[in-house]
Image (cartoon, rainbow, N blue to C red):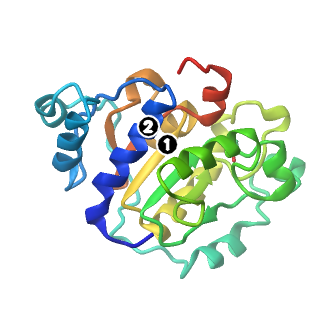
């Protein structure tokens, strides 16, 4: 993928259309923060998937507090993702360090324009050390393929880098401990767009308890980066009606 921001509206339009084609309903876009968001909203309206451009541009639907901390103009102390990975991959800051098989740092293009953030590694991810390689990952690959992307075009990471035993939900203290790692990844990659996959990722990134249904299909922002929230691929597998 090239680094041309001009292509983002078109890519986003195709991504959302692919999701609609996969049965995930229509999208209402509001509070756009991307410079090209007007363009995105217009194209989405054209495609019949936005309620109205005026609504898209005029309504402030965010409920999350402003993010503190990282601004992407600040530099991180690591020179590269690889250096960061090496610094943290033996982490024992929470009990999951004792139960993991592999630390699951992230995968993809270090210069990706688009970054996907999931919840935590599952059994397959823990075995292979790569995010989204199980069934949910196969669906994510199909969604990417529908917009002519591969894993090498985007970057994929999780809130937690180690598997919670039995795939239970991440605990607040685990997320608090691990979240700075993701923040560093975002700072190093500096994506132009973040897509949070599912409730846990979305709520953690936005520091909110707002339900997924109210976060989904709207523009948010993480560390100055426009962020979209959508269903987790595992939820799509479970509830085909989405
Ligand atoms: N679900 C996630 O949220 N992340 C993974 O890496 C795999 C499944």
Q: Do the residues labelled 1 and 2 touch (CB within 8 Å)?
A: yes
Identify which residue, 201 or 9, lies in the foreground: 9
Residue 74 vs residue 195, the one in the foreground: 195
- In the drawing, does residue 215 fall left or right of residue 233? left
For the image, the number of numbered tags is 2
Q: Mark 1 points at which residue?
A: 196
| Lateral position of residue 103 relative to residue 171, left or right | right
Give the label on residue 239, or none.
Answer: none
Residue matched to label 2? 229
Which quadrant holds residue 234?
A: top right
Q: How crowded is mark 1: few (under 14 residues within 10 Å), some or many (20 or more)?
A: many
Relative image position of residue 201 (x, y in whole percent): 55, 39
**Residue at position x 29%, y 30% from top?**
49
How far apart are the two marked residues, 1 and 2, measured between alpha carbons?
5 Å
| Residue at the (17%, 41%) spot, across then down | 42
Question: Residue at image x 25%, y 52%?
Answer: 34
Residue 67 visible at all: no
Image position, residue 141 (x, y; %): 62, 49
């Amino acid at each position: 993928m090239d680094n041309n921001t001009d292509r983002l509206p078109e890519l986003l339009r195709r991504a959302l259309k692919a999701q609609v084609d996969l049965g995930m309903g229509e999208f209402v876009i509001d509070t756009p923060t991307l410079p090209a968001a007007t363009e995105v909203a217009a194209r989405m309206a054209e495609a019949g998937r936005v309620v109205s451009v005026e609504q898209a541009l005029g309504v402030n639907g965010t409920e999350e507090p402003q993010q503190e901390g990282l601004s992407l103009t600040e530099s991180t102390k690591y020179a590269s993702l690889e250096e960061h990975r090496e610094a943290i991959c033996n982490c024992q800051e929470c009990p999951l360090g004792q139960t993991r098989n592999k630390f699951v740092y992230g995968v993809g293009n270090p210069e990706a324009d688009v970054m996907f953030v999931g919840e935590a590694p599952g059994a397959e991810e823990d075995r292979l050390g790569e995010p989204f390689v199980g069934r949910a990952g196969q669906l994510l690959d199909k969604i990417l393929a529908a917009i002519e992307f591969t894993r090498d075009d985007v970057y994929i990471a999780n809130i937690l880098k180690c598997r919670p035993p039995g795939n239970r939900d991440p605990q607040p203290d685990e997320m608090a401990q691990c979240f700075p790692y993701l923040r560093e990844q975002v700072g190093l990659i500096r994506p132009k767009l973040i897509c949070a996959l599912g409730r846990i990722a979305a709520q953690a990134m936005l520091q909110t308890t707002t339900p997924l249904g109210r976060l989904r299909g709207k523009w948010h922002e993480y560390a100055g980066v426009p962020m979209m929230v959508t269903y987790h691929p595992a939820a799509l597998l479970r509830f085909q009606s989405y």
